[in-house]
């Protein structure tokens, strides 16, 4: 059973471009969470999704950021018109249930905006 | 929202010695406290967790203690080994578990 797969591992974008980060949860997991880690800081919750539904996006910036988890395919975190402050590591986690079960993290996507 | 503070930010110990990392949280409603280990270039990995109905939990060389009254919890690693070198994060959540508030991390270096 493969773990949580994130791609790409490293992504470089110029200011103003779009960044698309992908996350394939572990097999059998229907709950996906995205976290952002700025340099020298802990992870910050962004969004929680189930298949085709956004459950909690309270940690998402109001503009330029969006997330989806379609019925088929990976979860996508999309950042439009990237700025240098978006440079960070973005981690995805998945779990089979919410509450009282471990969420497994992927290896992350390191986004660099130049 | 919840605010988690973690100390120290860096910790260097001699192999075989113990390492202790401390965290405090602000919201008394928090009731789930996991600890994660993050190795270079990898995602965080859960190493131990504790819920607010328990004061202490141990798993081989790793133990976690929780003081709900003081709103702090600690990670103890005994008989440290070089492979324990990593960044350790504490976290807290209020029952839903998925919305974790993380500390800033402690970089632990075990000297051989």
Image (tube, rainbow, N blue to C red):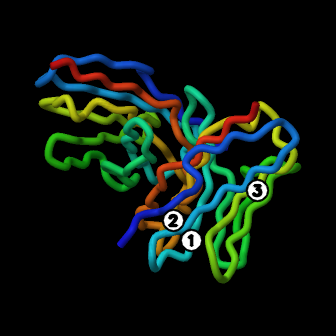
Query: Distance of mark 3 from mark 2, alpha carbons?
Result: 18 Å
Circle 1: element type: strand
Pick the residue in front: B64 or A1: A1
Chain for disc number 3: A
Chain for disc number 2: A
**Residue B90 occupies quadrant:** top left
Circle 3: element type: strand
First along the sequence among labels 3 and 1:
1
Residue beneath disc 3: A78
Q: Are marks 2 and 1 in contact (CB under 8 Å)?
A: yes
- Category of crowding for the residue at label 1, using alpha-carbon neighbours closer than 10 angstroms: few (below 14), some (14–19), many (at least 20): many
Pick the residue in front: A107 or B91: A107
Q: Quadrant of the C terminus of chain B?
A: top left
**Residue B9 occupies quadrant:** top left
Residue A75 place in picture, x, y as percent: 65, 67
Q: Which mark lies nearer to you, 3 or 2?
A: 3
Q: Which mark is residue A31?
A: 1
Apparent side of residue B112 relative to residue B64 in the rendered image (left or right): left
Please tell me whether residue B105 is drawn above or below residue B44 in the rendered image.
above
Does any portion of residue B14 appear in the rendered image? yes
- Category of crowding for the residue at label 3, using alpha-carbon neighbours closer than 10 angstroms: few (below 14), some (14–19), many (at least 20): some
């Amino acid at each position: 059973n493969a773990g949580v797969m994130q791609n790409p591992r490293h992504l470089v974008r110029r200011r103003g471009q779009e960044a698309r980060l992908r996350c394939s949860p572990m097999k059998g997991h229907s709950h996906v969470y995205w976290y952002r880690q700025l340099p020298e800081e802990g992870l910050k919750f962004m969004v929680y999704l189930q298949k085709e539904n956004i459950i909690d996006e309270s940690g998402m910036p109001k503009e330029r950021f969006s997330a989806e988890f379609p019925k088929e395919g990976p979860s996508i975190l999309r950042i439009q018109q990237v700025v240098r402050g978006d440079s960070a590591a973005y981690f995805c986690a998945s779990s089979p249930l919410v509450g009282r079960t471990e969420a497994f993290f992927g290896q992350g996507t390191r986004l660099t905006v130049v | 929202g919840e605010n988690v503070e973690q100390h120290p930010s860096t910790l260097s110990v001699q192999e075989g010695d113990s390492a202790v990392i401390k965290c405090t949280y602000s919201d008394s409603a928090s009731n789930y406290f996991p600890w994660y280990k993050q190795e270079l270039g990898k995602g965080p990995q859960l190493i131990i967790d504790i819920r607010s109905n328990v004061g202490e939990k141990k798993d081989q060389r790793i133990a976690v203690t929780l003081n709900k009254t003081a709103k702090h919890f600690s990670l103890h690693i005994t008989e440290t080994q070089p492979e324990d070198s990593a960044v350790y994060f504490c976290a807290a959540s209020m029952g839903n578990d998925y919305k974790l508030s993380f500390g800033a991390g402690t970089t632990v270096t075990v000297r051989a």
